[in-house]
Amino acid sequence: MKALQEFSQKEGKLGSGKAKPAWPDVPYHFYIDVHGRIAEGRSLEFVGDTNTEYNPAGHALVVLEGNFEQEQPSPEQLNALQNLVQWLAQRFKVSPESVQAHNDFASTACPGRNLKALLPEIRARLFAHSIESTSEAP
C-alpha cells in the first residue's frame, strides 16, 4: 500500500507520455495486497480517479497488487476480491453484470488479461450468492 500511496501522491509521466497528476490521497477506494488484505483508500463518498480518459463517478475502484498481464492473482487476493465485491453489491444493490473492469471503460491493459479472464467466474459467484441470499427464510 505504501508504494501505491507514494506513486499516487507524486507527479510524473505515464508510459503513454501523458502527465500523471499528484493526488492528495490514493485514488482507488480499495486495495488488495498479495496476501488478500484489504485496505481502504479514498472514501466511497468521493469519486475515485484513474490515469485514463473516463469518468469513474458511480464506480467503486478496486486495485489488486500485481501485474496480471504476467502473473496470476493469488488465491488470497481472489477470495478477498470476491468477498469485497459481494459486500459492495449488497450495499449498493449492484447486479453481477455491473461488475466490470477498468478496460471495459478505457483503453488500458488494466486489470491484466489473467485477472480479466476470472471476471465471469466472479460474476457467477456473485449471482449464486444473490440467489442464496434471496431464497433464505426471514
Image (cartoon, rainbow, N blue to C red):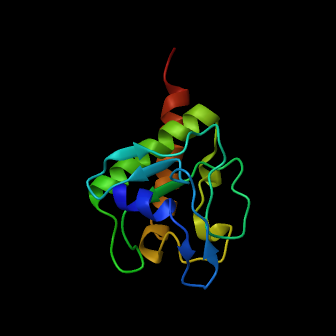
User: Would residue 128 appear left or right of 2 to someone viewing this image?
Assistant: right
User: Would residue 111 appear left or right of 93 to someone viewing this image?
Assistant: left
**The N terminus lies in quadrant:** bottom left
Rendered location of residue 91, percent (x, y): 58, 32
- Above or below, 99 relative to 67: above
Rendered location of residue 76, percent (x, y): 28, 53
Rendered location of residue 107, percent (x, y): 65, 77
As rendered, which of 39 and 75 lies closer to the eye?
39
Location of residue 88 (image quadrant): top right
Rendered location of residue 113, percent (x, y): 47, 76
User: Would residue 36 appear left or right of 92 to someone viewing this image?
Assistant: left
Q: Residue at x 35, y 56 (%)?
A: 2
Visible in this render: residue 64?
no
Visible in this render: residue 90?
yes
Q: Residue at x 29, y 59 (%)?
A: 34
- Above or below, 73 relative to 44: below
Q: Residue at x 65, y 52 (%)?
A: 98
User: Would residue 96 appear left or right of 26 to someone viewing this image?
Assistant: right
Location of residue 104 (image quadrant): bottom right
